[in-house]
Amino acid sequence: MEKHWKSPQAMIVGILIALIFCYIIIDLVFTKPKIEKDVKDVRNKYVELSTFLDKKIPEIDSTFKTQALQIKQQKDQMDTLKYAFKKLN
């Protein structure tokens, strides 16, 4: 049995397993907290953006409605001018 652990294949497999565990530990210690922090930052920015849009969307909507009314009024005025020019000719 002792010969099996001293063979090159067993050492390679042991080293690979050790490297995998090292990677898992490094991932848990460094990468996971960073990812959690990034997710928290994104969530906070989403909340800020959502709040901003909740305030701005009604303003934008009212502006579009005002512009639509102005465009309609200008069209009516242009139709009136067009009719007046036809009468002059």
Image (spheres, rainbow, N blue to C red):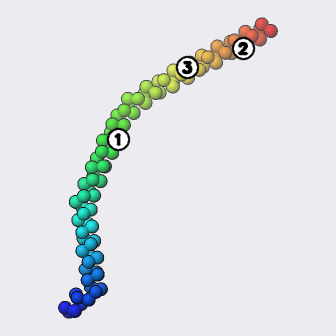
Of label 3 and label 1, which has the lower sequence position? 1
Residues 22 and 79: in front is 22
The answer to which image quadrant residue 47 occupies is top left
Q: From the image, tell me which residue sits under label 1.
A: 46
Q: Residue at x 69, y 12 (%)?
A: 81
The answer to which image quadrant residue 79 occupies is top right
Residue 23: x and y in percent read 27, 67
Task: Give SS at disc 3.
Answer: helix
Q: From the image, tell me which residue sits under label 3.
A: 69
Gap between marks 3 and 1 measured at Cα = 34 Å
Q: Give yes or no for contact between labels 2 and 3 (Cβ–Cβ under 8 Å).
A: no
Above or below residue 48? Residue 25 is below
Q: From the image, tell me which residue sits under label 2.
A: 82
Horizontal arrangement in the rendering, residue 67 relative to residue 44 (left or right): right
Gap between marks 2 and 1 measured at Cα = 51 Å
Horizontal arrangement in the rendering, residue 22 relative to residue 46 (left or right): left
Residue, far right = 89
